[in-house]
Image (cartoon, grey):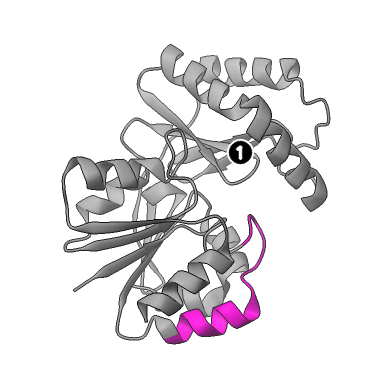
């Protein structure tokens, strides 16, 4: 049986925003009789805010925090802890102080189960500022540079670009690809950050490396995902 695996930000919903209501209705109906999984860098609370309680509790499993916290039928079945050490935090604070992006809005470090989410602009920024930073970062590649520096200085951790404004930092190997250890059979994976450095890349890379039966759907928006699902129907 096919397994359908979905990223959330930029794939099922706009980044950190709720799923479009008509898409939610369609998706709930589309899921019937299918093995559907969600995988995201976000925590449970944010995910429920975005996809809604019905979708969250109806999928086979939800892999929160890049798979470091796992819910099955709405029940917690696994979680892994991770915290920054002082040297990592010191380096990240240096990036924060020296960034060419000068507008800061607070909540730069967010502790999640199994990972730390770091943002230069800060997660308290408005949606408008979030989009401005995202466009600025596409040109300046600040998040990619931070990730590369972190992994060079701390070989036991991984850092990847997630969403529009942040970086996911976790123990090496505890990225989204770890979910493939638990899902057997053909994988249909939908994500918007499949390029190297993005937090969907580990899944796409491992599927191709291991030559598992799979199909990758790199999308640019929830609308594109919706259209692809209509075609698959």
Q: Residue at x 26, y 61 (%)?
A: 187
Comparing 17 with 70, the one in front is 17
Q: Which residue position holds label 1?
A: 166
Q: Residue at x 67, y 62 (%)?
A: 17
Q: Quadrant of the N terminus?
A: bottom left
In the picture provided, is 89 more to the left or to the right than 105? left
* Residue 233 in the image: above or below residue 77: below
Q: Is residue 18 magenta?
A: yes
Q: Tell me the element at label 1.
A: strand
Q: Is residue 136 magenta?
A: no
* Residue 129 in the image: above or below residue 145: below
On the image, the x and y values in percent for residue 119 come to: 65, 35
Range covered by the magenta-colored residues? 14-29
**For the view shown, which residue lies furthest in the front direction?**
231
Rendering quarter of residue 184: bottom left
Q: Which residue is drawn at 56% across and 21% down?
A: 145
Report how many numbered discs are placed on residues in the image: 1
| Residue 124 shows up from this direction | no
């Amino acid at each position: 049986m096919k397994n359908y695996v979905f990223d959330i930000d930029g794939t099922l919903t706009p980044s950190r925003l709720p799923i479009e209501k008509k898409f939610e209705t369609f998706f709930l109906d589309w899921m019937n009789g299918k093995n559907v999984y969600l995988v995201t860098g976000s925590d449970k609370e944010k995910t429920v805010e975005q996809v809604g309680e019905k979708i969250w509790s109806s999928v086979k499993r939800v892999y929160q925090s890049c798979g470091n916290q796992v819910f099955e039928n709405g029940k917690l079945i696994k979680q892994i802890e991770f915290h920054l050490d002082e040297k990592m935090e010191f380096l990240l604070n240096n990036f924060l102080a020296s960034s060419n992006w000068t507008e800061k809005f607070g909540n730069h470090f967010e502790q999640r189960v199994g990972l730390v989410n770091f943002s230069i602009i800060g997660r308290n920024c408005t949606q408008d500022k979030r989009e401005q930073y995202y466009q600025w970062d596409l040109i300046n590649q600040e998040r990619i540079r931070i990730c590369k520096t972190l992994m060079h200085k701390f070989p036991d951790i991984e850092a990847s670009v997630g969403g529009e404004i942040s970086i996911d930092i976790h123990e090496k190997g505890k990225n989204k690809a770890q979910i493939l250890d638990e899902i057997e059979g053909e994988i249909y994976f939908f994500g918007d950050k499949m390029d190297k450095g993005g937090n969907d890349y580990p899944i796409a890379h491992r599927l191709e490396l291991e030559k598992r039966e799979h199909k990758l759907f790199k999308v640019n928006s929830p609308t594109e995902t919706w259209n692809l699902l209509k075609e698959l129907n």
